[in-house]
């Protein structure tokens, strides 16, 4: 039996310059944020409560209509450059007795079905204070300095399959203890990087092109 209180938080500001009202724009006929809400609901054996942190009335109404709790985010932590952690810290000021936090970003609408179950099992068994998902990047990367290209993770002529593996933070899932959040970290120095190799890892909506790609993936899955 799970002894720790675990909540999910979905941070969803109303302001978005590149895609107006991005968090509630419909993807497959469903507001973007609802995809992550539904994923949290599928994991009710782990998640005790689901919270949406928002400064926007439209997002608030959609969250309530979908049966989750809402934290009214103050204006002073709702700006364009505000880091996600301040929304979680604010939640901990409002809601008491939380042990573990699962961060689900609405801009990552798709996740492998069993991902949270596997991640939380690992998080619990290893007694971690922070876990986040990463995905291998197999591109040949380099830097340009003084108009000269300098390979970063390979040598010119090297085969792609022989590259030194690099990974990127894919944003699918984060699990953090409340104490780690209070110390000012989502990804702590000893955070566990859980490797995920899945098409969903490449769906992170920030631009209209990202949204179109998400629609392509959604329609492909539907077929």
Image (spheres, rainbow, N blue to C red):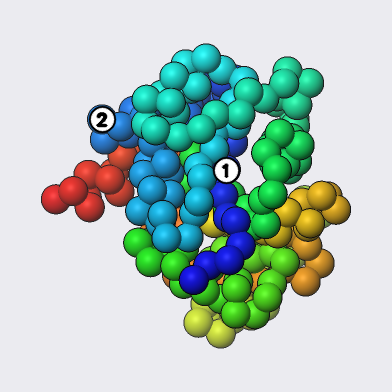
Q: Is residue 44 left or right of residue 219?
A: right
- Residue at x-position 43% and y-position 44%: 36
Q: Is 27 drawn above or below residue 198 in the view shown? A: above
Regarding residue 52, the answer to whether it shows in the image is yes
Q: Which mark is residue 50?
A: none
Residue 8 in percent (x, y) is at 54, 48
- Residue at x-position 43% and y-position 49%: 40
Give the image quarter of residue 155. bottom right
Query: Which mark is in front, 2 or 1?
Result: 1
- Residue at x-position 58% and y-position 66%: 3
Pick the residue in front: 51 or 196: 51
Q: Secondary structure at mark 1?
A: strand
Give the image quarter of residue 153. bottom right
Q: Residues within 10 Å of mark 2 (few under 14, many from 20)?
A: few
Pick the residue in front: 152 or 122: 122
Q: Is residue 26 left or right of residue 57?
A: left
According to the picture, the residue beneath numbered tag 1 turns out to be: 9
- Residue at x-position 67% and y-position 51%: 98
Pick the residue in front: 177 or 5: 5
Q: Residues within 10 Å of mark 1 (few under 14, many from 20)?
A: many
According to the picture, the residue beneath numbered tag 2 turns out to be: 29
Q: Is residue 164 left or right of residue 184?
A: left
Q: Is 212 drawn above or below residue 116 in the view shown? A: above
Give whichever of discs 2 and 1 has the lower sequence position.
Answer: 1
């Amino acid at each position: 039996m799970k002894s720790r209180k675990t909540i999910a938080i979905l941070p969803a500001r109303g302001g978005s310059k590149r895609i107006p009202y991005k968090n509630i724009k419909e993807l497959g006929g469903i507001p973007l944020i609802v995809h992550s809400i539904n994923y949290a609901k599928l994991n009710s054996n782990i998640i005790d409560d689901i919270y949406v942190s928002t400064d926007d009335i439209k997002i608030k109404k959609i969250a309530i209509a979908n049966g989750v709790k809402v934290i009214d985010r103050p204006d002073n932590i709702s700006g364009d450059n505000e880091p996600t952690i301040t929304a979680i810290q604010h939640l901990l000021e409002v809601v008491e007795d939380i042990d573990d936090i699962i961060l689900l970003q609405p801009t990552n609408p798709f996740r492998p079905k069993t991902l949270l179950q596997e991640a939380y099992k690992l998080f619990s068994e290893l007694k971690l204070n922070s876990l986040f998902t990463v995905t291998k990047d197999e591109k040949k990367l380099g830097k340009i300095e003084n108009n000269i290209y300098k390979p970063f993770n390979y040598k010119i002529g090297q085969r792609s399959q022989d590259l030194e593996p690099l990974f990127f933070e894919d944003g699918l899932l984060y699990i953090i203890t409340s104490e780690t959040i209070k110390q000012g970290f989502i990804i702590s120095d000893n955070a566990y990087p859980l490797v995920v190799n899945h098409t969903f890892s490449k769906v992170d909506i920030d631009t209209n092109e990202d949204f179109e790609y998400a629609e392509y993936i959604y329609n492909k899955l539907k077929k």
